[in-house]
Image (spheres, rainbow, N blue to C red):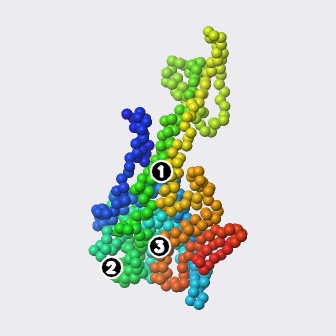
Amino acid sequence: MEIIELGMGISYIPEAQQIIAMQPSNSIFEDRDLQPAIIGKYKVAKWGEDNDLPQQIRAKAEASEVVSSNLLFNTQVAYGLGPKPMRRIIENNKVVGYEELLDGEEAEFFEDNDIGLFMLEQLTDMNYFFNAFPEIILSLDRRKIVSLRSKEAMFSRWSVMNSKAMIEYHLYSAKWDNSPTEQDIEVTDTLDDYNPLLDLQTKLNSSKYKQLRFMLSVFMPTPGRQYYPLPNWYSIFQSGWYDHAVAIPLLKNTILKNNLGVKYIIYISQDYWDRMYQLYGISETDKKAVQEFRNEQIQKLSNFASGKENAGKAIAVEKRIRQVATGTAEEKLIEIIPIKNDLSGGELLQDSEEASNIISYSMGVHTALIGATPGKNKGSLGGTDKRELFMIKQALTKPLLHRVLRTFSLIKRFNGWDKNFVIQVPEYTFTALDQSKTGKVETVDNNSVKTE
């Protein structure tokens, strides 16, 4: 019995006309009672059963247009108009606004380290994994933080906690899913989650620490996860909705291949071959040359009949009239007859819509905000509804954004910058045209609004 493997755990048995879908294991999300990976002198806290959960999540996201689009949308909303170095304007002990810093040490640090790229990398990892890994780099005299880097979450792991329940090391390698050796791992000391400034100062005053690089931990907390948070939207994998969504295109392809795959029957008269052999000087006794020629011509006809680029085009063929017992009959050298399509092409569309909506719900994305809503009710929201939904979405990204911006509080205090220096992320708030000619205003916070 032939079994056709379609991928994503889906198999098709043509003889029985059955689809078999294997439910994947959810053990990849378990991190309790996992034995650490021992690599040289380091005990690595595994991220997933096989220590490759980030790699698996990336592969799953890339296989779904809904998941990948939602992740990009969430990152773009949190990024807003991009980070800017700002100074708070204080009047009567109250913040009344902000002004952008165009020069000075803070502005130079911002430009030297491409903070825009840093923010995008951090927000991308936070949306994918609820975990981001910013690394600070000190000057040679260790008096200033001069550089900031985002270490990719996919290649980051923590060391197992010590006896004081502290994570001492960040371990970085591109080979976690391919049995890395100790030489493949870059090791960086970590700073305390709650008071990184005090921890950094303590380490610099100790003769034990000579390095110039230190790693911070940025994460969104989830219950019961000691090392790696589990984003709430991973529920789509555990519930099976993700597998349902990605299986639908495979199932539809199977339907097309096995029910609609034969769209035409091409009849070729023997007289056609006789004439073609004569025209091209092919001897019928040369079996190899005959077979190659026939295969070549059949392929050309098949491509012509099935190619989308040939839709609406015509093919010229010869025919002749021959005598039969009842009179005369037409004999065509080539005849292409289409096969009737009894399927409407709308199979599984409602299932696809339901799965897409549930995935988007889990990821906190209203489908109307990313340009299209599948199903019969698409386009049912008005501009006001969409504007309010977008403003709600912007507000809900603030916890994620604040976690990423926390790194700059450490840098500001350690470097002794102006206490009123802040990194702000302005964003557009869309409004009615009678309030703004362009229908949007740029906001920094509630005290600073710029109309455009």
Q: Earlier in the sequence, mark 3 or mark 1?
A: 1
Quadrant the N terminus occupies: top left
Spatial separation of the CA atoms under disc 3 and disc 2: 30 Å
Instruction: Inspect the image, locate mark 3, and give the three-letter code of the amino acid beneath it.
Output: Arg
From the image, state whether disc 3 or disc 2 is nearer to you: 3
- Residue that carries the numbered disc 3 in the rendered image: 403
Under tag 1, what secondary structure? Answer: helix
Q: Secondary structure at mark 2?
A: loop
Q: Nearer the viewer, mark 3 or mark 1?
A: 1
Q: Residue furthest top?
A: 325
Q: Position of residue 439 (x, y in %)?
A: 68, 68
Q: Which residue is mark 2?
A: 208
209 or 26: nearer the eye? 26
Q: If you read the primary sequence from the N terminus, does the residue marked by circle 3 or circle 2 appear first? A: 2
Q: Is residue 280 above or below residue 184?
A: above
* Residue drawn at 46 percent across, 82 percent down: 414
The one of 342 and 14 positioned closer to us in this rendering = 342
| Label drawn at residue 245 | 1
